[in-house]
Amino acid sequence: MNIHEYQGKELLKAYGVAVLDGYVAWTPEEAVDAAKKLPGPVYVVKSQIHAGGRGAGKFKDDPNGKGGVRLAKSLDEVREAAAAMIGNTLITKQTGAAGRLVRRVYVEAGCDIKRELYLSLLIDRSVSEIVVMASTEGGMEIEEVAEHNPEKILRAPIDPASGISGFHARKLAFGLGLEGKQVGTFTKFLIAMYNAYTALDAAIIEINPLVVTGSGEIYALDAKVSFDDNALYRHPEIEALRDEGEEDPKELEANKYSLSYVALDGNIGCMVNGAGLAMATMDIIKLYGAEPANFLDVGGGATKERVTAAFKIILSDPNVEGILVNIFGGIMRCDVIAEGVIAAAREVSLSVPLVVRLEGTNVQLGKDIMAKSGLPIIPADNLADAAEKIVKAVKEAA
């Protein structure tokens, strides 16, 4: 689960992470009121959306072509910046062409920036450790740094059993070129950040940029905080921060039925049981010349109602030109899948090609149910056969 920058900073501040003062605003007038609480005379007005690259982004209706992060040197400029952002659609590298509607802004105090660094915490599953990543190339996307200047990325693995120590922080501080009291300040900052990471069950905390001021202070100028969905039951206070307006409506609907769904950009809808089989299904669709429109795992204990809901979610995507159902029935029974597919197809008036491959428990019963349904369902014998048939059917229907 993702949250907004201002929410992330509020959480981090509670653990002792140094952030600049700031306030969220829903209207230009509230933005001015927020600025009045700050020392000034420099303010920063930031669009709040769940996407990076806001500063370099562009608004659809902004003739000036300014980005989603703007410097303001007066209250009038704060009002002007907020008015240009709120209610407008911001397009960044991470939003895609559709962009994201800005519903609120964050008005933050300006500061004297001497250096911009990069700092993040995440899980390295290959070694089962928490890893601190740091770089002198703050303000840049870390993927670009990794591609063009990988030597500038510092890594410090931390065993979760023993936790972080001053050694980890000092080693990174020296690698970043920090000096004097900056080393101690950075050490305090990183330990506080680590404590927040573990206590909140975060998936990633990314500070980009981490700034060093002219006086040697260190602040999180930005904060991307994402949480492990599987641990949200332990954090109702974090669950309450969810902004459903920033999430795909199809993914929200899938969550109601405990379905694992991720929308993609292709044209072949997929309904599969098991994450590994779902990935293999997506791969073979690409192998046969098409693109998957989604990842959807109905799980091992799906009911007829869940299968029906999954089918309807797939068809709610206007880009879907065909559907491939690929089920290996172990815990999941093939007859339950067949009943769900038929019920959903009738309810939504199926108008795209549908290929179904069933194997496993009650497979013949499932095939018989579909054969007697009277619906134009194309049966498949194996995964390759299914992929070939759905790609061919979509091309013929085009």
Image (cartoon, rainbow, N blue to C red):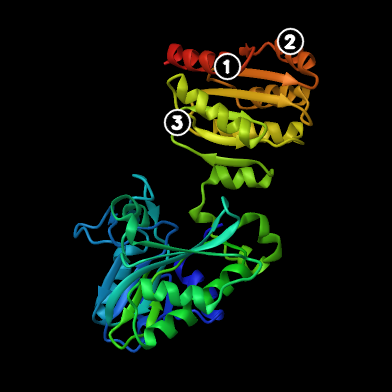
Q: Is residue 193 above or below residue 334?
A: below
Would residue 205 be seen by someone viewing this image from the given angle? Answer: no
Asked which quadrant contains residue 270, the reply is: top right
Q: Do the residues labelled 1 and 3 touch (CB within 8 Å)?
A: no
Task: Report the amino acid beneath label 3.
Answer: Gly
**Picture disc at residue 266:** 3
Q: Where is residue 111 in the image (x, y as percent from the top left)?
A: 31, 82
**Picture disc at residue 386:** 1
Q: Position of residue 172 (x, y in %)?
A: 42, 72
Q: Which is more N-terminal, label 3 or label 2?
A: 3
Q: Disc 2 vs disc 3: which is toward the camera?
A: 3
Q: Residue 48 versus residue 262: which sits nearer the camera?
A: 262
Q: In which quarter of the image is the N terminus?
A: bottom right
Q: Which is more N-terminal, label 2 or label 1?
A: 2
Task: Report the amino acid beneath label 2.
Answer: Lys
Near mark 3 (Cα within 10 A), the count class, few <14, some 14-19 or many ≥20, is some
| Residue 228 relative to residue 136: left or right | right
Q: Disc 1 vs disc 2: which is toward the camera?
A: 1
Q: Where is residue 252 in the image (x, y as percent from the top left)?
A: 59, 48
Q: Residue at label 2?
A: 372
Q: How far apart are marks 2 and 3 (CA)?
A: 31 Å
Q: Residue 235 versus residue 319: which sits nearer the camera?
A: 235
Asked which quadrant contains residue 348, the reply is: top right
Residue at image location 56% in from the left, 42% down from the top: 250
Residue at image location 49% in from the left, 30% down from the top: 292
Q: In this view, does 382 lie above or below 13?
A: above
Q: Residue 184 versus residue 52: which sits nearer the camera?
A: 184
Q: Is mark 3 on a helix, strand or loop?
A: loop
